[in-house]
Amino acid sequence: MAPAGALLRRSLKAYQVYGANTDVGKTIFTTLLCKACQKFRPGEDVSFLKPVSTGPQEEADDWCSHINTYVPGVATKTLFQFEDPVSPHLAAATSKQATPSDHVVLQSIRRHVSDRASSQPGWLFLETAGGVHSPGPSGTTQADLYAPLRLPVVLIGDSKLGGISQTIAAFESLRIRGYDVETVLLFQDSHYDNHTYLSQYFAGEHGIPLQAFQPPPRRSDRQSDVRAMSAYYETETETEQAPDLVDRLERSHQTRIKTIETMAGDAYRTIWYPFTQHGRLSPSRITTITSAHGDYFQTLVPDSENQPPGDSLLQPSFDASASWWTQGLGHANPKLTLAASYAAGRYGHVMFAEAIHEPALKLAQTLLGVLQNPRLSRVFYSDNGSTGMEVAVKMGLRATRQRYNIDNATKLQVLGLKGSYHGDTMGAMDSTEPSVFNEKVEWYDGKGYWDPLFQRALIDVVRTFPELLHTRHTVDASSQGPSVWTGLPVIFDEVFTGLGRLGPLASASFLGAHPDISVHAKLLTGGLVPLCATAASESVFEAFNSQHKTDALLHGHSYTAHPVGCQVALESVNTLQNLDSKGAWDWAKQGWEQRPADRPSSGAKAADSLPHVWSVWSNKFVTQISAHERVEGVWALGSVLAVHMKDAEASGYTSNSAAQVQQELLAGEIEQGDSWNVHSRVLGNVLYIMTGQMTDEVDVQRLQKLLARALG
Amino acid sequence: MAPAGALLRRSLKAYQVYGANTDVGKTIFTTLLCKACQKFRPGEDVSFLKPVSTGPQEEADDWCSHINTYVPGVATKTLFQFEDPVSPHLAAATSKQATPSDHVVLQSIRRHVSDRASSQPGWLFLETAGGVHSPGPSGTTQADLYAPLRLPVVLIGDSKLGGISQTIAAFESLRIRGYDVETVLLFQDSHYDNHTYLSQYFAGEHGIPLQAFQPPPRRSDRQSDVRAMSAYYETETETEQAPDLVDRLERSHQTRIKTIETMAGDAYRTIWYPFTQHGRLSPSRITTITSAHGDYFQTLVPDSENQPPGDSLLQPSFDASASWWTQGLGHANPKLTLAASYAAGRYGHVMFAEAIHEPALKLAQTLLGVLQNPRLSRVFYSDNGSTGMEVAVKMGLRATRQRYNIDNATKLQVLGLKGSYHGDTMGAMDSTEPSVFNEKVEWYDGKGYWDPLFQRALIDVVRTFPELLHTRHTVDASSQGPSVWTGLPVIFDEVFTGLGRLGPLASASFLGAHPDISVHAKLLTGGLVPLCATAASESVFEAFNSQHKTDALLHGHSYTAHPVGCQVALESVNTLQNLDSKGAWDWAKQGWEQRPADRPSSGAKAADSLPHVWSVWSNKFVTQISAHERVEGVWALGSVLAVHMKDAEASGYTSNSAAQVQQELLAGEIEQGDSWNVHSRVLGNVLYIMTGQMTDEVDVQRLQKLLARALG
């Protein structure tokens, strides 16, 4: 699917009108807004859009004709019209028309806006139907359906009995989806006096101005109605409030644009970026991300100041680094938001030492279940992959010293893989070999031996032949149960690889081996907040068990096992597991046949069964680009694609060969009139691209097409 | 104020009935629930509670008399009755009665439940008024007002036009406050058919069962109404749905209790705790925290299995470690929740390298403003205090090497304070002196010199006499502007001390000195999610600036500057600043006079003015307990109180002397019939207690009283 971009154009002041309920006067207020804009911005275009309407054609025209009657000159339009006068999801189901998908609705709105936008200043009011969560044609509620457009909102409050509650609840449902409510309008009602309470609530608590207008005259016969309504609109736009309202909407539009256009410059002066050489940075190289939805960022277009005022200031940009490998269930996934806010509302954060709360316990139990590793029985929480790896190393060192009675004076080191990377805290970095990441730093003090062995071979050697490690003691594993480690404790860093990024939920299964310690982060929270879980076996855990406080694993962070992170992770892991069991990736698996040769030799202690090795990137595509003259090799697994570029001059991290392809992807393309591009990251000569765990086949195909073209 | 505890008793199945709107049939459904419980749980008490009602007394009695008419034998009660038939906040304002505070309303409910609860099994349905956000007497909306009770919810959906939206929005407003919605009930309506959509939505998306019942008969005259309604209730409780509903509510009550009673045991087997010697742990020592609100945890009472079934299973426990020093704006603060969910809904997480989003930029700008340190101009984000301190050390080492042209082979070390602690990652620990935290670990490799100097003296020496450092180069600071560091870059670890914990927002002001690097976490996010900001001067920043990628600060975490954390921090820092400027702590400051002697000697380069030194702990109280025979010394500053206990046998971290007082605090006391206690943490012989930043004088006085008694 082509991404539905957010709507922002310099010349077009566009607002979405949401109602706190049905029958709160949305159309009357929209008409008032149109009239006020016409009155106080003479010469500016004013237009009205009703994306979806139900009821007979003549009634649908009613929205438009009401506005045309009282504010002549406003361009009005209904995009989707269903005969049956019920909720759009029901009307669409019984209609002869095909039900438009959410994507089609959004694209139609975008088209309409493109057609309306010009170099002349103008206004657009997009009126929703019913309340904020009234379903659209597909059944998706409007608050979710229209969220990707990220239009600022005029919320029409409810002045009737119960209206305070309806208005606040509607506001919250919008807010938790990232909507900016710019103003609240409602009718004055001296009996219920909702506007007094709500004014204090919105202005006082949230800095959102509220204005109360007189209610319209009661209806009588058609002819006097028209006269009365004409007079009403005339009177209400003559109040002081009306020009104030127009001024505020004007100002908020300009402020919105100014903010996003100055952000890169301000960031350039204020932010110290991770992993970034500022000497090579400039404001124009900083991507301004105004929002994100699904797989796409919405970013400020380059050189926006110099483009025609009717052009879009934002463009969709596929998040092909999966936001540094974290993204799994789509940006702004409402279920993750709700999980996070539930935990925030139930606990905030609660301290974890010698205490337990439900999200932390359930997550630990769920994770141990998902990993399907009979060795693992304990979960230690920390804040990110790097700290989680330090915890793992601390566990492994202690278990080893204790098992082999090594005295305190003897320094222990790790046995690791060449080319590995486990995070940026000093302890994690000291556990990796000397590399470009630490060659120039003052503090690096590598403590280990690093081999280029195959991982499985390394594990087998360590576990089967402990005498190679020159230890005096050996352990007969068979006498001690399957969860007791032998040789050395084996740590798997699954921070990036785990939970489905490479296909299976436990990528340890690729090696047919069960680690003694396994570290999980990134996808763990589906791409929302930091959290890490280091899972360990009872045999490792026991090494810290004594009567002395100082023997304990004296590690902890204040926000250890923060409920928000645990609840989000619980939702994520359950969702990832469901996707897996429901065959969400069957379309991708089909193209990658499982060959018997993928299985390990019979001599090795294999896990019960090896997983299917597959990728969302098609076999054909991978084969094709791997033969490209600029490409040295391609690696595809699960949602990850890594393209190693040839570079005659430089190699590895210092190479710039991948950056050229990255630029091509960022330039993007125009598809059916809409521009889109791909935001990716490179590691020297390696361009890596990954999708989310919910990206569909069509989107992968688009990416493949663009990447093939970028390679030239 | 006495804390309002959550309501949970083994024998009493209590549910709160919320309506998605006014006029959705709350009373009819509550009556149905009462009748069904009576029918299918013969012999069990059924009671009905209307906490707040408005309208003439006879109408108020209507709720009760309706239930008494159709379900004789139900105990009914209204707690607060206001004559004026408008919203309770308006009715209370015009009433002759004093408006009851939220606290009084909650305590009245608790009293009523205490009176109702017995050893016999029973049911209680607490019916709210209007919609979820209809205001209570004080103006606080019901969803916020009743949240501390944490009663499971029966949500009455809206079957009318627009009801889908109202029901989902109401559900979300409850959910983001941590409510558990156990079931949704609504009337069948074949025209709008909301129940079909909502059934799919609640059961399919959220695992919450929904049941639709027939609507009641239309009203005619009073006598036939009674007959018709009697028949209606009879018919509806004869459907299959009715016993199902009762069974589910019964099961969910039992499951709720079983879950919290097994959590400690399950955690004991599954969780590997931070900073905890498991050999000295037992399930009974693990605190089960079921929720938290304001300053209080709700915890499972000890030995709950053996107490009378009518007793409360939960008790409020003052969070006196401020959840490991993080808590500032109250647990489950709705504004922090809304800030978190807004960012989640707008972005999810977006990658931060060479990109910018609004919460990260605004937070950086706001923080630099709050710190009022003219040296600081850059913000680097990481995930917690420990990683933020590693970042600071990396910054300081590079700046030093670069300034003095020290070659790569020369190892640099830190100059630190004795007795300091900067977090648990290996690099942070290696920057602190050998101590009980690292004496037994395999990996500790202290890299520094640690002095017992006064902090300000150390700073002055380092900055003024660089030749003492045996460096070959000196810098004339006066020639380079005030933000250029001299001698060595000075790092302040403000992770714990900053943002008001010790009183002033920048506790650096105590020393009258401006650090070159300043690290902030914990209170930064008000006590919700992990985030750290390391602020640095341009002069430090420049040391990493070149054309070579490998000279950059190659540090970063995947969730660096996650929007959720930044938005929450922005809300927190703004709130803390507002509290400060609005004199929220004037009551505490009054007791602590600022003496001229607190000022530094005139020779030192002082900051413009020194802050007032004060504490929420009263001068009198601190003086009193410091003279206690068991106490060696007392330290009070801002919201922190540290009591150093005498111990003849052991000292420091290995002492257990503070643990005895801790146990006394945990035993707590009964106040006006309600038990409450204090959950604190100790560090060896030091008992430390801190309040949140919004704890009021009355609560501090209660804590002081209990602590004085605990000391004996």
Image (cartoon, coloured by chain):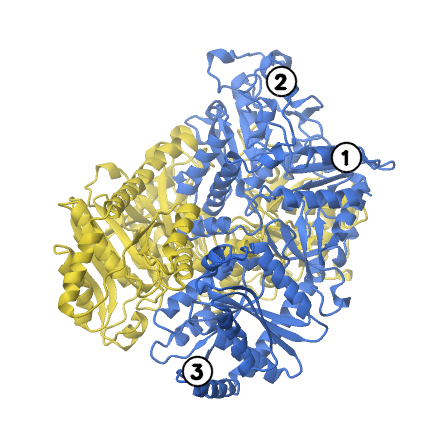
Chain colours: A yellow, B blue
Of callouts 2 and 1, the N-terminal one: 2
Asked where in the image residue B36 lies, by quadrant, the reply is: bottom right
Element type where label 2 sits in the image = loop
Q: Amino acid at mark 2?
A: Pro
Residue B540 in view, yes or no: yes
| Disc 3 packing (10 Å; few <14; some 14–19; many ≥20) | few
Residue A712 in view, yes or no: no
Whole-angstrom CA distance, mark 3 to mark 1, is 68 Å
Q: How many marks?
A: 3
Examine the rendered structure and indicate whether residue A428 appears above or below residue B673.
above
The residue that mark 3 highlights is B214
Q: Between tags 3 and 1, which lies in front?
A: 1
Element type where label 3 sits in the image = loop
Would residue A95 be found to the left or right of residue B485 on screen? Answer: left
Asked where in the image residue B418 lies, by quadrant, the reply is: top right
Where does residue A426 sit, x and y in percent of width and height? Answer: 59, 36
Element type where label 1 sits in the image = helix
Chain letter behind tag 1: B
Is residue A205 or residue A84 the one in the foreground? Answer: A205
The residue that mark 2 highlights is B600
Q: Which mark is residue B624?
A: 1
Where does residue A711 sit, x and y in percent of width and height? Answer: 31, 46
Q: Between tags 2 and 1, which lies in front?
A: 1
Q: Amino acid at mark 3?
A: Gln
